[in-house]
Image (tube, rainbow, N blue to C red):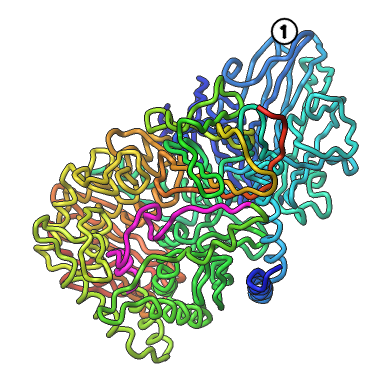
Amino acid sequence: MPPVPRGRETSVYATDVPVPTIPVLVTGLLGSALLNGAGEFSWVRETRGAPIDWGGVYGQGVRLTGPWSLRVGRAGPTVALGRDTLVSLVHDHGGVLATHRTGGVEVRDETAPLSSSPGIGRRITLTPLGGEPATLTLESGFDPFLAPVLIEGVKPDLYRADRRGSTLVVESHGFVLALDADPLPGAMQLGGAAWRGEKRVGDLRDLALRWTLPTTADAPASVSLSLLGGLERTLRGSPGRAELSHRSSWRPAAESGWTDWTGGTPSLEFPDAPELEEGYRLARQALRMLYTAPEPGFEGMVAGFPWYSSIWCRDLAWMLPAVEWLGDAAWVERSLATVFRFQALARLPILAARPGELPMQVSPGPLLLYGTSDTSLYYPGLVHRHVGHTGSVEAARRWLPVLERIVELGIAWTEPATGLFTNGGELEGMRQASSFGNVHVGFDAVDTTIWDSTDRRDHAIDVQVLWAETLESVAAIGQGLGHRTPGLMERAGRVRTAVRTLYPWPAEGYLYDSIRKDGTPVAKLRPNALRAVSAGWLAPDAARDAVRRAGADDLSAPWGVRTLSTRDPAYDPQAYHDGQVWTIATAWAADAALRAGERALGVDYLRRNARCLIDEGGYANECYRGDRPEPFDSCFLLGFSVAPFLTNLFQTLWGLSPHMERSSIDVRPRFPMEWRRAALRDLRLGAGRLSLEWTPERVAAFWTGPGTLQLTGEEASVDLPSGASATLTVPRAP
Amino acid sequence: MGARALSVDFSVIWEGLEIGEEFGFLSLEELARVGRCLEHAFYEPGSLALGPEGVTFRLKNPPLRMGAFSHLRVLLDGIEVDGERAWIQPEGAAAPVRFNRIDRQNPVTIPVGRPTRFMLEIPTLSAGRHTLRLELRSIAIPPLVWIEITDVVRHTGAP
């Protein structure tokens, strides 16, 4: 991968050499396209152990097409554009420009996300080389797909295609795609047979269009296409024709969205660790790619690409803290509102929903699925965090009933004797839902924590941390609103006490991963126990022991942290949650190490995260084999893999914790002893911006206001008036 | 229809109403739409047949889990068919593969959107409805995935 030059804020990837193995992801808020580094709408990826081509166009959470090919000819057979013809490819925030040369023709193939419709626009410009006029042939072909990404591994075999006016429409089970072209093609085929747009029904494949285009060197030919779709109601009002009418604005609209957003984010400087600086820049960009707003009132972030490109609310919960740090509080609030809309109020076995539960997955429709132990428990903490970043309690006031229902849900799943939250059995009611006439499908999932393909019953340790955070957050929010929440802090205290009593694993200097209902510890060494370290539940010596134990090479690999120790009999380097390295686990280790005082180790983990982003061209894989640094069964971009790293830079390395509801922020940096300087500029907090510059023993700060901001360090505090600078004394690194 | 089946149907109706009231009837519509999509997504209706090769049936998509599988098991009317006598042939594969030849080193992929044919060396099967249960274990995500199909067998010719 050629490195992306530093300082080029709008660039993502550029090459003069076709690299079909590199994914090239074009995203807008409503739709996306996946290409490869040869400019082909095709990208083959090992997926759960087998190759699948994920190339094509996606809109509103629906895969609209399979791979989409272009062929060009000049007085002879056409040639496929791609790995044999590419001369340059530039991927930036406006989209992708691939330039090809073949058979005396230069082709510029520009792809941009549509800003108003769920899909993409494509402009193909053909120029004859050599100065002579020529009649050129352009052919376009793809298979319709039309399945929601929410459902893994399904492609329908019944489609209906016809032409409505000049728009080609293909529909399957209420999911549609619409293709508009200017000029209109001279010929069309469907399934290899000539087609004039009359209605066709069946397992329709290979929708092919053909243009014959007279050109001169001074007058190249241009074909513009809009391909969009998703839910059937998307097509009302012929959006494709409207999109073509302002094709010249496709790219500028996409770019301006990025430019405006990036301009509102802070900058970070780590002269002693330039890879962290570059990692931050790439992580920020990668997170923005995951933003989604597929229909009005529906905003959030997709979990990842290519096969998790819908809203998974657990994944969203890991991403929103990073979005707060990037200063986009408005997007956080709209995302939270979207999720809270779909809180179940009653038991709905067909959706695996319990009263008070937030969905696991949400897609436009809306299409909802529930049935996880932990997803709901993230959200009270997110609301509390949002108050801290914005200083406003109004959203929290509106959402308090939602949060209280989550607490009721949690209490219903709490073991009375210990106060521990019980995970497991969330999907038992779904058998009914999985029956389709004479066909029943299912999978044996007994438990749905973050490692949802393995059994971590009955009281997984990280879920206890989340449960205690839920209780404490709702109590704090209630207190801030003058609303009584009796007993919540006591319950949280019981959880902490139970973990401190029942989970220590003396033989390993670590914590058990879970406890059975009968009190039997589950002696599995997983990184999840580090969440209790990060929460500050362990005494300092025990915290350091746990961090060092996790740093041993049975759990920590040079490329990241495994989901299970290699010494466990169940360890399998290919098993999703029983041996693979997960990038998010590396971020957990970084956070825990820094908080436990192991700064060198913590920064080392941060560097591992950053190296992933840099080596993977600005993306970050979901997971890798446990025995070698090779992605396996892994989305190439996952919010889980990007956001926690970014959050760590602000929250843990810089040691920032804002409390804007009382106009203060904790500033407790954890930079390594050998570092000399770090800077953070234009961090949005409340209605102002904060800039910090750290050198050993001092933090110089500037605040734009309004009002005075109090900075609180380990041993001192200072008031920072609006428009003024001040210096906070901080301890030298040990 | 038995009373028990009736009670199941009513509970689904009530749940549907609850979904409509909580999330809007568009949500109910979407749920029904996806259900209709999935009803025909996995098994090719009418493909259960008894012919010279034995019992055959086809899948159109992998059930709930894409990718490669290291273990397959099939039961016909509750009785497991020996892995030596059960075969799978995805479209494009050169030859069918016995179930008991499939393991982590030799997994089998059920392709998305392409038919996969199954053959069970069972010489006779009575007319009427029969139930198949196919269990699959992914090489990447261990929990068992399964599909149960009830269909009327077509007799396509004596062995």
Q: Is residue B92 visible?
A: yes
Q: Which image quadrant for residue A179?
A: top right
Q: How many marks?
A: 1
Look at label 1 and name its amino acid: Gly
**Is residue A457 highlighted in magenta?**
yes
Give percent across and percent down for residue A640.
Answer: 41, 52
Give percent across and percent down for residue A16.
Answer: 51, 21
Q: Which image quadrant for residue A503?
A: bottom left
In this rendering, the answer to whether A261 lies above or below A504 is above
Give percent across and percent down for residue A102.
Answer: 66, 13
In this rendering, the answer to whether A344 lies above or below B85 is below
Residue at point 24%, 56% (across, down): A694
Residue at point 47%, 80% (across, down): A405
Tell which of A331 and A517 is nearer to you.
A517
Q: Is residue A152 visible?
A: no
**Is residue A475 highlighted in magenta?**
no
Q: Which residues are magenta?
A: A439-467
Which quarter of the rendering shows the N terminus of chain A? top left
Q: Is residue A506 left or right of residue A4?
A: left
Q: Is residue B134 left or right of residue A71?
A: left
Tell which of B41 and A62 is nearer to you.
B41
Which quarter of the rendering shows the C terminus of chain A? bottom left
Helix, strand, or loop for circle 1? loop
Q: Is residue A417 left or right of residue B27?
A: left
Give percent across and percent down for residue A202.
Answer: 79, 38
Chain that bears disc 1: A
Q: Is residue B16 left or right of residue A20?
A: right
User: Which residue is labeled 1 in the image?
Assistant: A130
For label 1, count other residues whose C-alpha is less than 10 Å away and answer few (under 14), some (14-19) or many (20+): few
Q: Which image quadrant for residue A713?
A: bottom left
